[in-house]
Structure formats: C-alpha cells, structure tokens
Amino acid sequence: MQSLSTAQARRVVLAAQGFLDKPHDPPTMRTLQRTVERTGVLQVDSVNVLQRAHYMPLYARMGPYDPDLLRRAAERRPRRLVEYWAHVQALMPVDLWPVMQHRMERYRAERGKWGFVASDPVLEQRVLDEVRERGASTARDLDDGLPRSKDHWGWNWSETRKVLDYLYMSGQVAIAARNSQFEILYDLPERVLPPAVLAAPTPTREEAHLELVRRAARSCGIGSLRCLADYYRMLQADVRAAVDVLVETGELVPVTVEGWNRQAWWHRDVRLPRRVPARTLLSPFDPVVWERDRTENLFDFHYRIEIYVPAPERKHGYYVLPFLLGDRIVARVDLKADRPGGRLLVKAAYAEQHAPPETAEELSAELRRLAGWLGLEEIVVEPRGDLAPALRVD
C-alpha cells in the first residue's frame, strides 16, 4: 500500500480542488463549469459580511470574475446549476438531480419524522396549485395570496415555509432563483430543470451512492471514509459499500497518510503535483476547509467559525478567512465589506507559526485583489493581530 506524507496529501487535495487549473482571463462560463466540476458543490449561506458563500470558492480558484456568471448558471437557461440539499444547502450541477431522487424519495417516505413538515395534505396541495398558477414565488408571496384563517387551512408564515421546505426536499418544487433579499423563489421542477435532466433515468440507490462517492472522491483527491461521507452527507455504511466497488474497479487506490489513524483512498484521476502555485483567501464554507478535523490534519490549521460566538469570547474575529499560500494555510484574516463606504475592513490579521517571511507581502497583494473584485476602493487595516502591522495595502 502506498504511503503519502502530509505535504503530498495536501498537494493532491488542492489539485483535486482545482488550484492547478490554468486561469482564463477573463474567466468565462467554461471556467466556472470546470471549477464546479472540481468542487462538486457550492455551499449556500445567507451570511453577507464579505460576499455570499457560494461566490467565494469560485473567486479562490478563478480569480476576479463577473458574479453574473454564477447567477446565469443558476437562474437562467440553459441552467447549469440548481440548489438542493447536496452537502448542506448547495448549488450542484443539474445532472445530479436524478441522482438525488433516492434522497427525495426518502423525505417523502419519512415525512412524519421531520419536524418542519406541515401535517395538512390539503394545505400542501394548495401550495402546489398556487405555485403552478403563479410561477416562481417566495414563501412571502404565497402567504400574502392564500387564506390565513385558522379554521380553514391554518395558513400562516410558519406553515407556508414548512410546506415549501418539505416540497423542496421531496423534489416536488425546485429553487428557480433568489431575489435581492436572498429569499428563495420556488417553482415546479419542469419550469426549472432542463428537459433532458428530467427525462434522465433514475438510478437505483446503489447506483446513486456509487456516483456520489465517485464525485466526492474526485473532489477530495484523498479522503477517509468520514471525508467521503461528509461531502454529500451520506451514511458511512453506504459509502463503505461504494468504496469497495470503486477499489475493485481500480478507481480508488488505498493509501496511508502520515499522521492519519484511518484508512484513506486516492482517486486515480487526481495527480500529485510537485508544487501548488496558490495565493488566495478561502471562505469558511470552502470545501478545502469545511471539514475542520480534516483541515487540521492536512494543514496543521485549527479553524472554527466564530459567527455565533459572543463578541468578547471570539479568538480571531467574526468572519475569518484562511489565507492559502502555496500548499499551506499561513494566516487568517477577519474581513468585512463596508459597501456604503466603499471600504474593505481588515478587522484582524494573524500569522500561523509556520508562515514564511513573505506572508505579509503576499496577503497584502491578495487583499488588494479581493477589494478590486468586490468593487471596494479603500482597504482599512485595524491594529489587531500580529500580522496586521506588517500589511501594506496602499
């Protein structure tokens, strides 16, 4: 069995995630599709302190790009991406819709187990009828247009949202877009998904598990059972069965990784590069860092998002982004976009113990690049963190 050092495993992981891809200038829809093939999904999150979570992994790999590329891919024909509960709430390639049918069926079969599901089938049908008649609608749109009487359908905001959440998870409605307030616009799948996707055969559960593990392995590059299961939030028993098949066919190669106390597998299509020429900031929801124990094992980087930690108890800041330089995470920086003032606020900046001497210079350059992409004219560095005094952003 082949054995890899931690540094080698890091480089395989970053190669799998697209950090070796040659940049397009400017990035195109083709660039975006290639990048999403690497990441597999783009996690969606409502936090907008700096930029919405699903835009940031594309920036980290593609560099400054027109955000309208992602809006076109996710909201306009020919639709390339659609939201579903893939990792968590995430944008995924539309060809995964049939693969997720087994997950949708499970939600339909187990609807009584889910606390968010409204219990009135009449109300459920009423919502579907309204969506069919109105077209793409938010929960608020539907709430405004349907009866609220407690003695009729029991209609209110919470019931509306419960029904829509269930219809979405069970595949009876799909997400057509989000409005400027980031509210979801729900519509019928046939008005959201390309016809070829809806006509595609539904794989068996075993076939679906195999495809999801295959994709997870390509995106991970190297992963343990836990890594592969986390990528699409699968049961480890289902992943184990799929891994056995992929090992037998030669698609996955068993390896050991320095410092890992568990079996790992290397996808045969992901190469081990000599170096990774990366210099970028990673969102807290980037696939490279979203599984925190894996991040610590690979990068010697202990990372926790502190959004929900009371301000006096935060160690590094509210919205802290890891700074990737080469194949190491060498710093972390707490950032905020002051959009009315046109400023990128550097609330704090900290170097890791293994940070090289050029870290401040490289981070300064990256902050200027990020500010330019966000359309912010000024960078303000606050004097918090050991790296902050060395940043030069003028």
Image: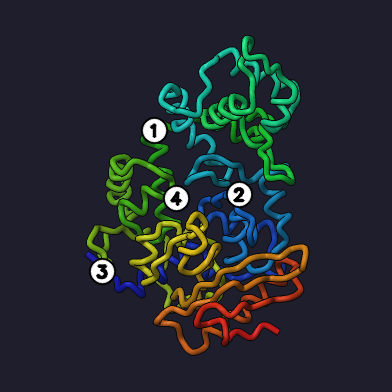
Q: Residues within 10 Å of mark 1 (few under 14, many from 20)?
A: some
Q: Residues within 10 Å of mark 2 (few under 14, many from 20)?
A: few
**Viewer-nearest of discs 3 and 1:** 3
State the CA–CA distance, disc 3 to disc 1: 34 Å
Q: Mark 2 or 4, which is nearer the eye? A: 2
Q: Residue at x 66, y 46 (%)?
A: 74
- Residue 205's label in the rendered image is 1
Whole-percent x and y of residue 287?
Answer: 48, 58
Residue at left 62%, top 26%? 160
**Distance (Cα) linking label 2 and label 4:** 26 Å
The residue sitting at 37% across, 58% down in the picture is 267
- Asked whether 353 or 358 is in front, the reply is 353
Left or right? Give the position of 168 relative to 377: left
- Among the two numbered marks 2 and 4 on one chain, the one whose residue lies closer to the N terminus: 2
Mark 4 vs mark 3: give the one in front: 3
Work out whether mark 3 precedes mark 1 in sequence or the reverse, and give the earlier one: 1
Q: Earlier in the sequence, mark 1 or mark 4?
A: 1
For residue 215, the mark is 4
Q: Amino acid at mark 4?
A: Arg
Q: CA distance from mark 3 to mark 2?
A: 35 Å
> What's the CA distance linking mark 2 and mark 1?
31 Å
Quadrant housing the N terminus: bottom left
Q: Give residue 113's quadrant in the image.
A: top left
Quadrant that contains the C terminus:
bottom right
**Which one is earlier in the sequence, the residue at label 2 or at label 1?**
2
Residues marked 4 and 3 touching at CB (< 8 Å): no
